[in-house]
Image (cartoon, helix red, strand yellow):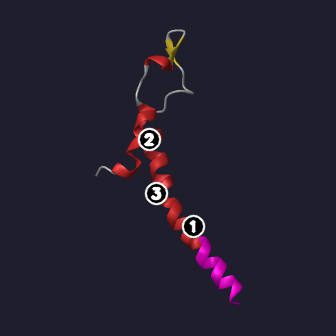
Amino acid sequence: MQNLALSFLDKAAVVAPTDHTNGSIDPWRLCSVSQVEELKAVLRLLPILGHGYHVRHSLLTNE
């Protein structure tokens, strides 16, 4: 299933001519596909974590 909301991150895994330095690919300029997909998974969890924080905060202030 393709998630188009975070598809702009896919560009980090595309090899560009500027990624090559001295004949080899610079690892600081290029990510693997698995790294991009892991970042997308973490970003999808942020709303859940934020909601949990707000629920916890509201429960603690009502005590």
Magenta stretch: helix, strand or loop mostly: helix
* 44 shown above or below 38: below
Q: Marks 3 and 2, Cα distance to the nearest angstrom?
A: 13 Å
Q: For numbered disc 3, what is the local secondary structure?
A: helix
- Where residue 12 appears, as percent x and y from the top left, is 46, 34
Q: The disc labelled 1 sits on which kind of residue? A: Gly
Range covered by the magenta-colored residues: 53-63
Q: Which mark is residue 21?
A: none
Residue at numbered disc 2: 9
Residue 44 circle label: 3
Residue placed under numbered mark 1 in the picture: 50
Q: Are there few (<14), some (14-19), or many (20+) residues within 10 Å of tag 3? A: few
Kindly identify the amino acid type of the residue bearing the numbered disc 2: Leu
How many neighbours does mark 2 have within 10 angstroms: few (below 14), some (14-19), or many (20 or more)?
some
* Lower sequence index among marks 3 and 1: 3
Of discs 3 and 2, which sits in the foreground? 2
Q: Earlier in the sequence, mark 1 or mark 2?
A: 2
* Amino acid at pointer 3: Arg
Q: CA distance from mark 3 to mark 1?
A: 11 Å
Q: Residue at x 50, y 14 (%)?
A: 24
Image height of 46 relative to 23, above or below: below
